[in-house]
Image (cartoon, rainbow, N blue to C red):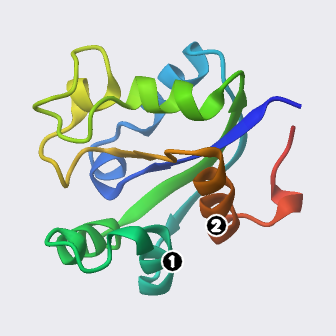
Amino acid sequence: MKERTFILLKPDAVRRGLVGRIITRIEDKGMKIGALKLLQLSQTQAEKLYEMHKGKPFYIALIRHITSGPVAAMVAEGDEAVRAARSIAGATDPLDADVGTIRGDFGLTITENVIHAADSRENALRETKIFFNPEEIIS
């Protein structure tokens, strides 16, 4: 089985109609989408997703943004999927992200940076479990 990762397209990506273009980039990188859903994050889901940032100065703004509208949550599968997704996502701050990355091309601010991509296999698994049941993921 190929490695799996968790990717979340944030409310700014959904609001701006970028979901299809971003999914195309993920697929162009050789990854397959194994699960995909559009949903409105609850406060609890948002807090679980970003629990490692609790207490940091940007935490409240991050939670407020991620719950401000629908998101597209997905599981992608491929060779070194975690690393590949992080690579195409680009640096967290769009001003630091390379042109050609998702954040470099579409991100507006450090908060409205259109995409969340798990930063490790462990976090990919933890984050996937917040949004998907095992039977919802197709290999």
| Residue closer to the observer: 46 or 39 | 46
> How many marks overall?
2
Quadrant of the image containing the C terminus: top right
Q: Is residue 2 above or below residue 120?
A: above
- In this rendering, does residue 118 appear at all? yes
Instruction: Please report the residue visible at 14 percent of the width from the left and 29 percent of the height from the top.
Output: 96
Q: Taking 135 as reference, is 5 left or right?
A: left
**Would you call the spot at circle 1 few (<14 residues within 10 Å), some (14-19), or many (20 or more)?**
some
| Residue 79 image position (x, y, % from top left) | 71, 21
Report which quarter residue 114 is drawn in: top left
**Displayed quadrant of residue 89:** top left
Residue visible at 72% across and 64% down in the picture: 132
Residue 113: percent from left, percent from top: 24, 44
Residue occupying image coordinates x 50% and y 53%: 72
Instruction: Find the distance from the CA under tag 1 to the CA under tag 2.
Output: 8 Å
* Residue 23 in view, yes or no: no
Q: Quadrant of the N terminus?
A: top right
Q: Which residue is disc 1 drawn over?
A: 45
Q: Position of residue 112 (x, y in %)?
A: 20, 51
Residue type for callout 2:
Phe
- Residue receiving disc 2: 131
Q: Amino acid at mark 1?
A: Gln
The tag earlier along the polypeptide, 1 or 2, is 1
**10 Å crowding of disc 2: few (<14), some (14-19), many (20+):** some
The answer to whether the residue labelled 1 contacts the one labelled 2, judged by CB atoms less than 8 Å apart, is yes
Give the side of residue 120 with respect to residue 52, left or right: right
> Compared to 104, does 131 lie above or below?
below
Outermost residue on the bottom side: it is: 44
Secondary element at tag 2: helix
Q: Estimate the x, y position of residue 85 in percent, counting from the top left.
A: 51, 31
